[in-house]
Image (spheres, rainbow, N blue to C red):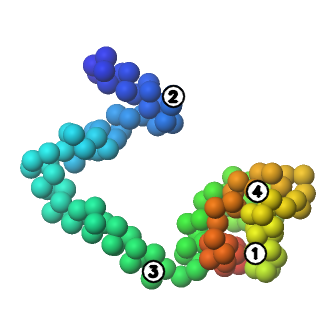
Amino acid sequence: MSTHSIVLTLFGVLAVGFPLWAMQNNEHGGGNTHLCVDDCYNEWYEDTGGIVEIARAEAAAKAEASPEQLGEAAYIGCVACHGAGGEGGVGPQLAGTPSADIEAALKLYREGGTRGAQSALMWTQSKEMTDADISNLAAYIQTF
């Protein structure tokens, strides 16, 4: 590994949280667009249809997803405190909580409201959530 690669790797681990070399070492040049040119770019474009087609496919998949599926994607940020199945831990148990209660709590947190000692943790989690995001998350939690 060259000194340049070591420096990039250390920067990636320390500043970004993952090794940058992982982004650079794949069949299409990874995250470094300067490594994927000519044939590499043409192959990537044939495989994916380009960035516009990738975005269209992602938008179509999201449009076809159920509220529960959309909520599942959002729940990733909840697992550390509420458990993978909503069983609780650092945060309270969510499994078995009515959707209306979950939605009301998240909307309260989004506005900076307090429900308990750990409310401040929820302010940042809910701040950017739309009403639709909150409804989807509540729908997913009902699947526990």
| Residues at circles 4 and 2 in contact by the CB criterion of under 8 Å | no
**From the viewer's perspective, is residue 135 above or below residue 74?**
below
Identify the element where label 2 is drawn: helix
Q: Crowding at label 4, few (<14), some or many (≥20) Cα neighbours within 10 Å? A: many
- Residue type, numbered disc 4: Met
* Residue 89 found in image quarter: bottom right
Disc ID at residue 103: 1
| Residues at circles 1 and 3 in contact by the CB criterion of under 8 Å | no
Q: CA distance from mark 1 to mark 3?
A: 22 Å
Q: CA distance from mark 3 to mark 2?
A: 37 Å
Q: Position of residue 82 (x, y in %)?
A: 74, 59
* Residue 51 visible in the shown view: yes
* Camera-side residue of 83 and 108: 108
Identify the element where label 1 is drawn: helix
Disc ID at residue 63: 3
**Which residue corresponds to the image point at 15% horizontal and 63% vertical from the top-left?**
46
Please indicate whether residue 20 sits to the left or right of residue 85 in the image: left
Q: Crowding at label 1, few (<14), some or many (≥20) Cα neighbours within 10 Å? A: many
